[in-house]
Image (tube, rainbow, N blue to C red):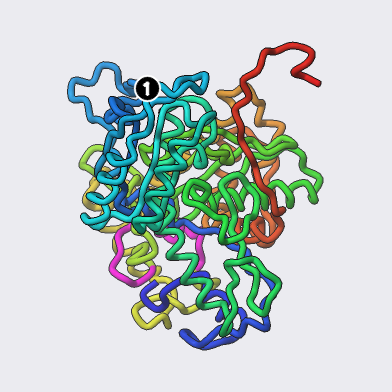
Amino acid sequence: PAHYDDAALQGIRDFLGIAAGAPIPADRIATVKMGTTVATNALLERKGERVLLITSLGFRDCLRIGYQARPDIFAKNIIKPEMLYERVAEIPERVRCDGTIETPLDEDAAREALLAAFDAGIRALAILFMHSYRFPAHERRVAELAREIGFTQISPSHEASPLIKLIGRGDTAVADAYLSPILRRYIDRVAAELAPAGGSPASGSSGPAPRLMFMTSAGGLTAADLFQGRDAILSGPAGGVVGASITARIAGLERIIGFDMGGTSTDVSHFAGTYERSLEREVAGVRIRAPMMDIHTVAAGGGSILHFDGARFRVGPDSAGSDPGPLSYRQGGPLTVTDANVMTGKLNPDYFPAIFGPGRDERLDAAGVRKAFRKLAGDIGDGRSAEEVADGFLRIAVENMANAIKKISVQRGHDITAYALACFGGAGGQHACLIADTLGMETIHIHPLSGVLSAYGIGLADVHALRQKTVEKRFDSSTLK
């Protein structure tokens, strides 16, 4: 990462044989399909846009109260969820559930609140009014006022999530306003790198510029100019599910457990002929109501750091990331799962190119890994060899990942002994057999492109759009016609 600004753009340059930083020849590219973790990282790190929430009078704290869920019912120290919006303004207005206007929209109050936030440097707005999923006139008017003032990101709840229930609609609107500007800046940067003079790949037009498309969390491709923050949370992992299911079907496998192990985390999924999607889920402590692939994530990856606290082994959840990366990368990183695989002989440094170290010209540091594990074995002091210590850490990581698979399969009533374990991701194949043995699975599927299967899946994915709408009608024969 220290040698280039963006991995995707550098990959395009490397594939075309172009020097780093050189202009990309747009005439050699027809379409670029990609996924991104920009929105996910912004959510995890809380580095999104500053957001103003405008809501109905009396509902200032509705999202903070939420559903009054208490994950730990016996906890004495209640830690309330962190809100993504920076400030909230209540506007006198009320539309009843039948469309009757009880209180007209106070446009002067709305304009005053918008101007105050704009003067404070806020440019992203989320709008949440009661019953606006059916009667959005007030939200639309406030959005018009915001555009006149100069807000660059406006997320009315009836557009972000046009469904009944105030909390889910509001959470999604705020998340969209928080993430979309970050995502838009990234898209614009990629588009600028790809576009020739006068072209714009974000438009999806058939002009001289390549067509730029992004993978959504629901498992389909969309044009760059339609890609929003709420749709980008599982952009990368969704491509893996698509890739694993299509390649498994080609191999004659109809039921698979997707096992995508990367550097920081492992994503697992269940596929038995159809894609499983959830319409509402919590990501990084934030509730989002948007169609997403049903993917379960556990903090165990190749970069998960190995810990010994004097009594027990622990793997993760913290990760060395790609910089500095594992100790074997020669960047001063800590011992990780990848290093444990080097120590036990599952990763042979002779099979890796000399791209490690500060100069990107060295091989994996097997000698340094052995030295570090021997020191750790000495600190543990129970007579185990360095190889046995490394194997112990691997078994803990395998159990963590196997438990994640059980949550999306065994705990839902699926007999996974009849399934194939579809392994992909940079570290999936290293643990395939141990995972299968732990779960009693007899078939493992590893595609030749398993290391880049998420990208391959994005290339295979269809262009599609999912639409949501609340229908409130009497359930009778006339409605069903």
Q: Tell whether 7 sits left or right of 128.
A: right
Q: Which residues are magenta?
A: 329-348
For image coordinates 30% across by 43% down, the residue present is: 85
For image coordinates 59% across by 59% down, the residue present is: 214
Q: Position of residue 309 (x, y in %)?
A: 22, 42
For image coordinates 46% across by 33% down, the residue present is: 169
Q: Is residue 31 visible?
A: yes
Q: Tell whether 79 sits left or right of 243.
A: left
Check residue 330 for magenta coloring.
yes
Give the position of the C terminus as an image quadrant: top right
Q: Position of residue 370 (x, y in %)?
A: 35, 63
- Determine whether 40 is above or below 157 in the image: below
Q: Name the residue beneath numbered marker 1.
A: 67
For image coordinates 35% across by 52% down, the residue present is: 124
Overall secondary structure of the magenta section:
loop
Q: Mark 1: give few (<14), some (14-19) or many (20+) Cα within 10 Å.
A: few
For badge 1, the amino acid type reads Tyr
Nearer-the-camera pick, 38 or 448:
38
Give the position of the N terminus as an image quadrant: bottom left
Q: Secondary structure at mark 1?
A: loop
Q: Position of residue 380 (x, y in %)?
A: 24, 46
- Determine whether 357 is above or below 184 in the image: below
Check residue 90 for magenta coloring.
no
Q: Position of residue 2 (x, y in %)?
A: 36, 75
Nearer-the-camera pick, 236 or 307:
236
- Determine whether 461 is above or below 28 in the image: above
